[in-house]
Image (cartoon, rainbow, N blue to C red):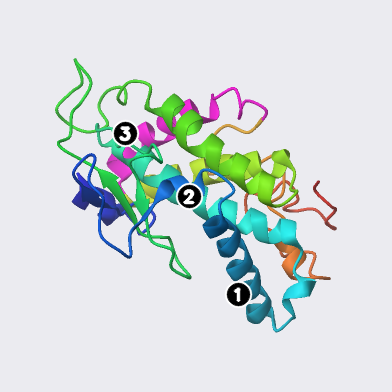
Amino acid sequence: MLEDLAAIGPFFAVSSHPPGAAPAAPWRPATELAFPSSRLRDRVASVRAALAARGGRPASEIEPRVTASAVHLGLTARLIAPALGAAVLGCRLDMCPDGLWWQDVAGGPVPLSVPVTACSTSPGQADEPGEEQVPGDWDRLLIDETVVPVTAAIAVLVPVSGRVLWGNVASAVNAAAAQVARQRPDLAASAWEAAGDLLGSPRLRGEPSPPGPAFRRSSCCLFYRLAPGNTSAVCGDCVLAGRGAVRNER
């Protein structure tokens, strides 16, 4: 199953360790992403510096909330993609921060290691992946045990709108399903169904757009503020996409 995940894309690829094990450095406990830790604060600072260097600007010109949104979107996308992919393949990954390990690297999806013993499917599930409903309440557990604490931790470190952060989550969900659909057309229907399950969370029901190629989130990730004066510098699924001008999303 892990090989199948890796074949979908880098945001889906994970390493594994036995449940309860503590992988050696440079692996770090993912619990430090689930509360406003010094490690998470340092990551926000390093991403701010990287964004500034990329644009040839001093770090002081990069708004903290834009950086926080970038860090949050990167982390939530990394956590959601393998969970959604595994569910579509008919397995459950334990994505609770208590058992996850990560590596604090710059650029690209952060390495993740998940506790894995064997792939177990729900009773009555078909042998072929994607043929029947994905396992159990994986969607609720992913949102409540993983996404909620990471989102709350970012919001404590940097004042940024919850509407922006939960829009990031919705965007990450749709992007993960879209990647599965591109790489595994045979699983496309199951991927969009899994995305619909996640977007059915009480925390995401404010997103009016259903998952799919035409998905449009109800907020902006704020990345356009990294390119002042460029009214086209918005993401494809942004609420501002296609408008003649951008506005502040708070």
Label 1 crowd (10 A; few <14 / some 14-19 / many >=20): some
Q: Residue 165: image x %, image y %?
A: 65, 44
In the rendered view, tell whether residue 74 sits above or below residue 92: below
Q: How many numbered marks have been drawn onto this rendered protein structure?
A: 3
Farthest-out residue, bottom: 56
Residue at the spot 75% in from the left edge and 71% down from the top edge: 227
Chief secondary structure of the magenta span? helix
Farthest-out residue, top: 124
Q: Secondary structure at mark 1?
A: helix
Front-most of 8 and 75? 75
Q: Is residue 67 visible?
A: yes
Q: Is residue 41 magenta?
A: no
Three-letter code for the amino acid on which mark 1 is drawn: Ala
Q: Residue 50: image x %, image y %?
A: 60, 75
Mark drawn on residue 87: 3
Magenta span: 184-206
Q: Secondary structure at mark 2?
A: helix
In the rendered view, tell whether residue 38 sits above or below residue 186: below
The residue wearing badge 1 is 50
**Who comes first in sequence, dot 1 or dot 2?**
2
